[in-house]
Amino acid sequence: MKKKSIVVSILVIALLFLTGITCLATTYYVSTGTQSLDVYGYGCDFSGTAGAEIASNGAWPDVTGVKVRIIVYKNGLKDVDTSATDTTSPYSVTKTGSCSSSTYSNVWKLTTTHYVKCGAESYYTASGGFEETQSN
């Protein structure tokens, strides 16, 4: 009877050990994102996305959130500054909007920055970005 309890104890300890190793394994992510700027007569529509996908060759360990920040400039002046975040897996966020103008001829610039939050960090780290300029 004593041998049986020792074998069961060893199996329980081994199971706990293996479970602990699995929980401590680091998962790596690749930061993804897109943007779009559609210009029309008296304004523009914009959108930006950010995400994190699991990849064995990823640069970001144990991602716990993503953020996208969008800044729209009209004729060189900041018109919109907005952002959105997502802290639930699968990590993906989209932010859309539009701008208007009382004049027809404008130069629009869209700047999109992607961020990731890793582990227990309380801050987001920039992971990439894009710029696009169009005029009407």
Image: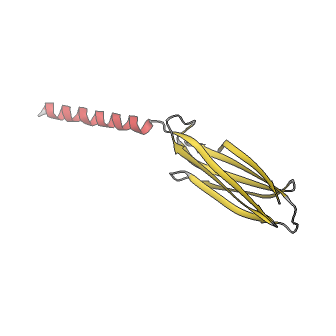
Q: Nearer the viewer, residue 128 or 62?
A: 128
Q: Please tell me which residue is depicted at 58% across the width and 35% down the height of the picture.
A: 59
> Which quarter of the image is occupied by the C terminus?
bottom right
Extreme bottom residue here? 102
Q: Please tell me which residue is depicted at 79% across the width and 54% down the height of the picture.
A: 134
Q: Position of residue 115 (x, y in %)?
A: 65, 46
With 124 as the anchor, is 105 left or right in this view?
right
Extreme left residue here? 1
Q: Please tell me which residue is depicted at 52% across the width and 41% down the height of the picture.
A: 62
Visible residue check, residue 123: no
> Which quarter of the image is occupied by the N terminus?
top left
Q: Position of residue 118 (x, y in %)?
A: 57, 42
Q: Quadrant of residue 94?
A: bottom right
Q: Specify the color scheme.
A: secondary structure
With 105 as the anchor, is 25 left or right in this view?
left
Q: Position of residue 12 (x, y in %)?
A: 26, 37
Q: Please tell me which residue is depicted at 24% across the width and 32% down the height of the picture.
A: 10
Q: Is residue 39 above or below residue 123?
A: below
Q: Is residue 124 above or below residue 15?
A: below
Q: Quadrant of residue 20?
A: top left
Q: How many marks?
A: 0
Visible residue check, residue 90: yes
Q: Nearer the viewer, residue 112 or 23?
A: 112
Q: Is residue 15 above or below residue 45?
A: above
Q: Position of residue 29 (x, y in %)?
A: 54, 41
